[in-house]
Amino acid sequence: MSAPHRLEADAGGPIACSACPAICCQLKVVLIAGDDPPHEFIDLDDEGHEIMGKGDDGWCAALDRDAMKCSIYEQRPFVCREFEMGGGDCIDERANWRRISLTLA
């Protein structure tokens, strides 16, 4: 695996999950073979695919809102395991989120 991309966070420091509004935890996560999160966190999308459920706030149902950490970290889906802090997908989603936020402002 190559070295992770680095991007300075909005506050001027390196990207850290603890200083992020959980952007990745608001994405649709489609479960694949081998994923085994607790049943209470699984939902179905309009096409009948199993996905990680979301709360009324739009965040993943498995996100502990107080700690801003995954409550099922050891059982998290493959796509979550592959979403690397500061990696390319993280950087892209942060950029998309900033563009949307600026558009709504």
Image (cartoon, rainbow, N blue to C red):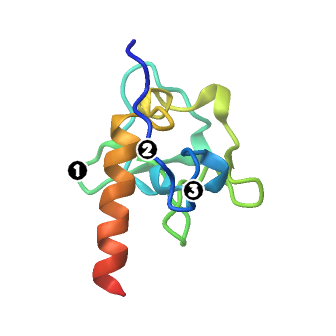
Q: Is residue 51 above or below residue 76?
A: below
Which of the marked residues, 3 or 1, is nearer the chain's N terminus? 3
3 vs 1, front mark? 3
Which residue is painted at 33% across and 84% down in the image? 104
Q: Toward the viewer: 57 or 15?
A: 15
Q: Which mark is residue 47?
A: 1
Helix, strand or loop status at disc 1: loop
Marks 2 and 1 sit apart, C-alpha to C-alpha, by: 36 Å
Give, as a three-letter code, the residue at label 3.
Answer: Cys
Quarter of the picture holding the C terminus:
bottom left
Q: Toward the viewer: 87 or 36?
A: 87
2 vs 1, front mark? 2
- Would you say the residues marked 3 and 1 are in contact, meaning their CB atoms lie under 8 Å apart? no
Which of the marked residues, 2 or 3, is nearer the chain's N terminus? 2
Left or right: 35, with 47 as reference point: right
Quarter of the picture holding the N terminus:
top left
Which residue is painted at 37% across and 45% down in the image? 91
Write down the residue under mark 3: 20
Marks 3 and 1 sit apart, C-alpha to C-alpha, by: 31 Å
Give, as a three-letter code, the residue at label 1.
Answer: Glu
Q: Toward the viewer: 90 or 66?
A: 90
Helix, strand or loop status at disc 2: loop
Q: Is residue 29 visible?
A: no
Left or right: 15, with 93 as reference point: right
Q: Is residue 31 above or below residue 62?
A: above
Dot 1 crowding, Cα within 10 Å, few <14, some 14–19, many 20+: few
Q: Which mark is residue 7?
A: 2
Give, as a three-letter code, the residue at label 2.
Answer: Leu
